[in-house]
Image (tube, helix red, strand yellow):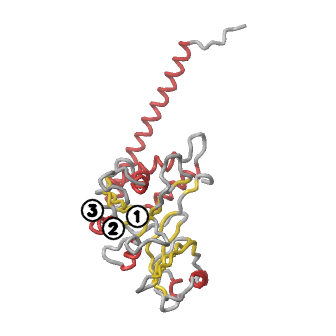
Amino acid sequence: MPDQTPDPAALAQSLAALRAELDGIDDRLHDLLMQRAGVVERVGALGAKGRVALRPGREAGIIHRLLSRHHGNLPKRALPRIWRELFSATTAMQGPYVVAVADPGDPQDTHSGGHVALAREHFGGSTDLRIHSSPAQALADVASGAAIAAVLPMPQEQETLSQAWWTALMTRDTPRIHVVARLPFWSPRAEGATHARALVVSVAPPDPSPHDHTLIAMEVPEDLSRARITALFSDVGLKPLGMILRRDPHASLLLVDADGFVAEDDPRFSHFPATLRPIVLGAYAKPVDGETA
């Protein structure tokens, strides 16, 4: 019977050839990354001076497109992770790139809580983070230009008035701050990953992606029920996917998560009763469900 033991010399030669092939691929990948960085520089040169170089909707669209064409054994979950690092690196080429994070943990510990982990996952492992104990401090960083964006806790029905940071966006202060993304962008979560949820705000206006949600706020009468609110939105062609209704002593404030990308001047708002004044707080790309991506 012939000896089936691999010839060590032939095996070493095959491995050397495969490693050389990988080295060549790495070089070509590096060439393309440098070429992409050059195009980003040209895009930045064409942009408005002083603008915030943040396009979460376009980034989400790129990831959706890549996932739709992906095949082979490389896990799909690797694509958002790779491209998130690439987006962060090239965005940082266009100006200061600092992200504020409202995290209830220790402000001096950059690994303290779930929102910090979300910020690292989304904005890159080497991105500078400014950790704060309150949403107000993180919002102040964005308003002053000390941060390009802020990662803030997901609004909750039972949150305190100080925790309800989204109510501050209803004032339309200058500079105007918008919701532009939701974290995490990828699910299901890997073992050991944070299960925290958050929204990202920035002075950059939201840009549309293939699948969006829009956050709409307004002051409403105290006697307006949730069922009536749902009917009002549905009647004008807006689909509410969720809502938070705050019955505060001086005002009842509503936050609706609506399906689709809705602009500030959407004509459907004109069909609301004159006493209701919808305010678009921003929009975000629907997170990717890795099970169906």
Left or right of 291 on screen, residue 150: left
Q: Amino acid at mark 2?
A: Leu
The image quadrant where one finds the N terminus is: top right
Q: Amino acid at mark 1?
A: Leu
Say above or below: 283 vs 246: above
| Number of other residues with Cα within 10 Å of mark 2, as a class: few under 14, some 14 to 19, many 20 or more | many
C-alpha span from label 2 to label 1: 9 Å
Outermost residue, top direction?
Answer: 1
Using the image as rendered, state which of residue 241 and residue 210 is in the foreground: 241
Q: Are marks 2 and 1 in contact (CB under 8 Å)?
A: yes
Q: Are marks 3 and 1 in contact (CB under 8 Å)?
A: no
**Element type at marker 1?**
strand
Q: Quadrant of residue 141?
A: bottom left
**Element type at marker 3?**
loop
- In the rendered image, residue 109, in percent from the top left (x then y), is placed at 32, 51
- Residue that mark 2 sits on: 139
Q: Name which residue lies at 58% across and 83% down.
A: 236
- In the rendered image, residue 25, in percent from the top left (x then y), is placed at 47, 34
**Element type at marker 2?**
helix
- Residue that mark 3 sits on: 146
Residue 254 can be seen, yes or no: yes
Q: Earlier in the sequence, mark 2 or mark 1?
A: 2
| Residue 152 circle label | 1
C-alpha span from label 2 to label 3: 10 Å
Q: Quadrant of residue 248?
A: bottom left
Left or right of 103 on screen, residue 68: right
C-alpha span from label 3 to label 1: 16 Å
Q: Name which residue lies at 43% across and 64% down.
A: 153
Say above or below: 288 vs 18: below
Say above or below: 135 vs 65: below
